[in-house]
Amino acid sequence: MGTVEESRLFGGLEAGGTKFVCVVGTGPDDIVDTLRIEVGDPDETLDAALGFFRETIAEGRSLSAIGIGSFGPVELRVGHPGYGTITTTPKPGWSGTDVLGQFSSAFGLPVGFDTDVNAAALAEGRWGSARGLASFVYLTLGTGIGGGAVIDGRVVHGLVHPEMGHVAVPRHPSDRFAGNCPFHGDCLEGMASGPAVAARFGRRAEHLDGADRSTAAELVGFYLAAGVRSIVYALAPERIVVGGGLSALPGVLVAARAELKRQLHGYPDLAEHERDDFLAPALLGGGAGPAGTLILAEQARRSHDD
């Protein structure tokens, strides 16, 4: 790990659905401290994260700002009464949790707040597979499926953050799985997330082998391509970066690239869509989210200073 000036240090919290990752540093190569917290009760989980940063400050490290990338859905409209809270999550006990407010009141520092996938998108844009691109999308395949879009260098927000995991997808001709999204059943997340694979095969994707592993890769690749097709036509990104644990299943991206070519069916007939790096693996892996929270902290500090 590199050495950084204490006055430039940022704190970051990747608040994922299964684990929280707290970091202190300036980027993926300058992490000076970190802590992983298994997610449980909201109060206990947030207390553990707050305690990490209190201890960091007590040890003499001066933080300029803190960035939080949270699982969603979250309220991102500045000025809205619920800004900074987790909203209608199916995760028991977490709906209505005011994540931003607790950190803002605890430390009196600028706090940046966004989704965990948007944080990861920012990191892949600065240090990873989308470096140098103005418009790209980051997708994560894991316990859920989420996406962050960067257009002209800015993360896309609207009435709510994009929910790419819940786009409608056609059914694979041989797939009889009903889907397990609690809201939509057979949307992209309901058909191609980690829990969807586990429900089909009776075990997690990383434990599959032989024909089951090949079938899982084909199915996830098919549904990923179907979701990407909608993204291609709606947002016209220069690249789509794919991360998350399920993206490491052997054959998934190969299957998705071939299926995307079939589903685009020659329209709009761009050579870029034929390239392997149009659908690219995330370079930062699991480090993208934590690194991106440091960018959120940096942006919060800059906005405060302006």
Image: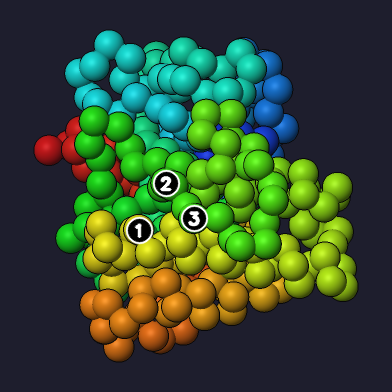
Residue at the spot of label 3: 170
| Identity of the residue drawn at 72% across and 32% down | 38
**SS class, disc 1:** helix
C-alpha span from label 2 to label 3: 10 Å
Classify mark 1: residues with Cα within 10 Å, few (<14), some (14-19) or many (20+). some
Q: Is residue 189 left or right of residue 266?
A: right
| Identity of the residue drawn at 41% across and 62% down | 228
Residue at the spot of label 2: 167
**SS class, disc 3:** loop
Residue at the spot of label 1: 230
C-alpha span from label 1 to label 3: 11 Å
Q: Looking at numbered disc 2 in the image, what kind of residue is underneath it? A: Val
Nearer to the camera, 274 or 139: 274
| Identity of the residue drawn at 87% across and 73% down | 210
Cβ–Cβ under 8 Å for marks 1 and 3: no
User: Residue 105: which quarter of the image?
Assistant: top left
- Residue 117 visible, this angle: no
| Residue 209 coordinates in the image, percent (x, y) | 87, 68
| Residue 145 coordinates in the image, percent (x, y) | 53, 47
Nearer to the camera, 234 or 179: 179
Quadrant where the N terminus sits is: bottom right
Q: Quick one: which residue is furthest to the left in this view?
A: 306
Q: Is residue 28 above or below residue 97?
A: below
| Residue 241 coordinates in the image, percent (x, y) | 45, 66
Classify mark 2: residues with Cα within 10 Å, few (<14), some (14-19) or many (20+). some
- Residue 276 visible, this angle: yes
